[in-house]
Image: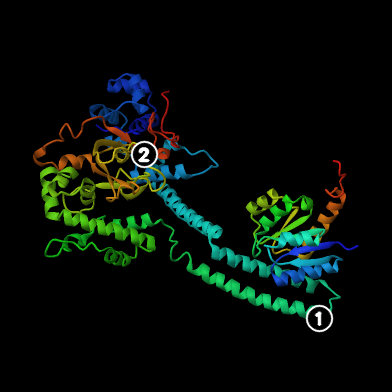
């Protein structure tokens, strides 16, 4: 069964390119462009991995990340963050908020594929909340 | 009585060069070796006959022992040391004077380069500050990076290979074409923007520096001040007009500096109206540069009298006087330096200045003889007062300004008529030993020191 990725990004041509690359690699790619409703979209679509841009209309990627991590359902969801600024400050902030991986724009297509695949295989080797025994 | 922290050091160096033992030299001039040792470690004042004797024995002119290289050069070197971060090799701070004296050209280069570095550092700071906080720049960069990301990714797809559906190929080509146009426009806007910033508001110097350079270009006096009174003796104190005048100067480039200069000009005109030059000259003849005398004669307040005295047009026989002002936070808001007393350009000044003593007790005038460390140390008669800036209401915050006038000691004495000396009241109390800034001040055992000196001028007796 194909893995599903949710791309939260507002730049149409970036969406188109990432969608193409990941689809060709066998992913089912869904997209969402509005920051304000992004958390709800994750809850509804239940993707295997989220690619999250930092600069979004409505709500910043950092806020979305924090809200997702506060929800037990998404505590272990792999989240790859995209930002236009590779500053250490931003990385630290994302790491503190519980990001799984971090990627600086502009990235190469193979970097993107590698990052997404690495995150999903990590996910398979570590138990998620859902997989863990419920009496823990 | 000259007392230089460095006269002793110079005697010691000179004696070593001559290969003389401390005990032998002490005997030839008739003092104990222990006393010479104290002198050499700058722990005893030396002057008069003893100094002449020592100079003779050391085969140098007296002035070679009392006057080192030029004070500005030494000050510049001290600042260079103070502002240097971690250095690869230890700096021989105890031999600054020798360096400046023997290699004045190289020393000058060090000072000049330090000034250039400071200017560049401030420019870099201003630019990185702009990078971090400018919303336009942040948006523009985001736009460029987004577009580049889309282009890179799309180009990667097209370049990488083989079996792309022709329909998709067309679509990606079109996307790339659109993005390249967006990138071109975005980068042009960025270049235009970067072209304009840095020229208007970002002169490398702070506005106060510009204002000071502008005032220094006319020796801190405003020559047209005394001719602008109308028939009724009133002076034009229109701020807008002053701003127009300030705007004409090439030395005032930033709007902030022009506005500060205009305020200065307006106030200086009001001061001049209150204290016409003829009256000031009469007071100078009768009492010397005494702000209290000028204030009593004209009804101006003390701070205004100090400003007026410090900014008179230079003329034969008129001593140049220094002035500093600060606001309630202690930040220096105006600096007119004198040779031997240069208020710090960056950072806080010496808390022992009468300026700050006045700040502690608003409206109580302070007068002290102060001594600035230096080569040789200079004494000044300092007058200071702290006054409210404006007559505020009962609920308004209390805004004050302290002003300090400093008169070189020789001018304070020489200006008095009939060879009168300063009255006991004028020199009452001990001489206050002050500095400019802790980092470049080597005064030992200072109760007001807030950070250690970076100058290893103090030696322990050998």
Residue B237 rendering spot, x and y as whole percentages: 23, 61
Which mark's residue is nearer the viewer, 1 or 2?
Answer: 1
Q: Residue furthest right?
A: A1
Q: Secondary structure at mark 1?
A: helix
Element at label 2: loop
Q: CA–CA distance between discs 1 and 2? A: 76 Å
What number is the disc on residue B350? Answer: 2
- Is residue B70 in view? no
| Pointer 2 chain | B
Callout 1: residue from which chain? B
The answer to whether B374 appears left or right of B411 in the picture is right
Question: Where is residue B36, by image quadrant?
Answer: top left
Q: Write down the quadrant of residue A30 in the picture.
A: bottom right
From the top left corner, tell me how far across and down residue A94 is, in percent: 68, 52
Residue B157 or residue B106, whichever sits in front: B157
Q: Which residue does the numbered mark 1 point to in the structure image?
A: B167
Q: Nearer the viewer, residue B353 or B16?
A: B353
């Amino acid at each position: 069964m194909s893995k599903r990725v949710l791309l939260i990004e507002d730049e149409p041509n970036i969406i188109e390119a990432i969608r193409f690359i990941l689809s060709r690699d066998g992913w089912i790619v869904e997209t969402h462009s509005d920051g304000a409703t992004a958390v709800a979209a994750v809850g509804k679509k239940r993707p295997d991995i989220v690619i999250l841009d930092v600069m979004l209309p409505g709500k910043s990627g950092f806020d979305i990340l924090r809200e997702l991590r506060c929800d037990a359902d998404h505590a272990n969801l792999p989240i790859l963050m995209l930002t236009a600024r590779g500053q250490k400050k931003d990385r630290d902030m994302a790491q503190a908020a519980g990001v799984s991986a971090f990627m600086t724009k502009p990235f190469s297509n193979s970097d993107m594929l590698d990052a997404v695949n690495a995150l999903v295989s990590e996910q398979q080797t570590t138990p998620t909340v859902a997989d863990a025994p419920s009496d823990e | 009585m000259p007392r230089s922290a460095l006269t002793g050091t110079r005697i010691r160096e000179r004696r070593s060069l001559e290969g003389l033992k401390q005990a032998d030299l002490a005997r030839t001039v008739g003092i104990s070796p222990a006393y010479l040792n104290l002198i050499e470690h700058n722990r005893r004042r030396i002057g008069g006959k003893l100094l002449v004797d020592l100079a003779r024995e050391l085969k140098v002119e007296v002035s070679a022992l009392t006057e080192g290289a030029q004070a500005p050069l030494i000050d510049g070197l001290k600042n260079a040391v103070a502002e240097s971060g971690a250095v690869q090799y230890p700096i021989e701070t105890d031999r600054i004077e020798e360096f400046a004296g023997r290699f004045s050209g190289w020393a000058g280069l060090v000072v000049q380069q330090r000034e250039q570095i400071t200017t560049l550092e401030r420019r870099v700071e201003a630019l990185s500050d702009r990078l971090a906080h400018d919303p336009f720049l942040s948006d523009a960069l985001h736009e460029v990076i987004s577009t580049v990301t889309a282009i890179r990714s799309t180009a990667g797809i097209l370049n990488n290979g083989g079996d792309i559906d022709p329909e998709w190929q067309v679509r990606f080509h079109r996307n790339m074409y659109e993005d390249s146009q967006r990138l071109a426009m975005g980068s042009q806007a960025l270049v235009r923007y970067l072209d304009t910033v840095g020229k208007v508001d970002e002169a490398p110097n702070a506005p106060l520096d510009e204002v000071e350079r502008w005032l220094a270009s006319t020796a801190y006096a405003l020559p047209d001040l005394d001719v602008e009174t109308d028939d009724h003796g009133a002076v034009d104190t229109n701020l807008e007009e002053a701003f127009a005048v300030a705007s004409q100067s090439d030395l005032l480039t930033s709007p902030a500096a022009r506005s500060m200069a205009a305020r200065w000009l307006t106030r200086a005109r009001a001061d001049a109206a209150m204290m016409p030059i003829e009256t000031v000259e009469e007071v100078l003849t009768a009492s010397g540069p005494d702000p209290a005398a000028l204030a009593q004669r004209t009804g101006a307040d003390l701070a205004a009298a100090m400003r007026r005295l410090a900014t008179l047009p230079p003329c034969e026989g008129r001593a140049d006087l220094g002035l500093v002002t600060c606001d309630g936070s202690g930040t220096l808001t105006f600096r007119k330096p004198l040779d031997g007393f240069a208020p710090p350009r960056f950072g806080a000044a010496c808390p022992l200045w009468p300026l700050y003593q006045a700040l502690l007790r608003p409206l109580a005038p302070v007068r002290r003889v102060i001594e600035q460390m230096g080569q040789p140390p200079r004494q000044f008669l300092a007058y200071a007062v702290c006054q409210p800036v404006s007559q505020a209401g009962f609920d308004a915050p209390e805004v004050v300004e302290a002003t300090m006038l400093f008169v070189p000691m020789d001018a304070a004495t020489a200006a008095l008529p009939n060879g009168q000396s300063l009255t006991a009241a004028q020199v009452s109390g001990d001489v206050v030993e002050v500095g400019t800034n802790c980092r470049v001040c080597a005064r030992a055992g200072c109760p007001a020191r807030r950070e250690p000196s970076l100058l290893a001028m103090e030696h322990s007796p050998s």
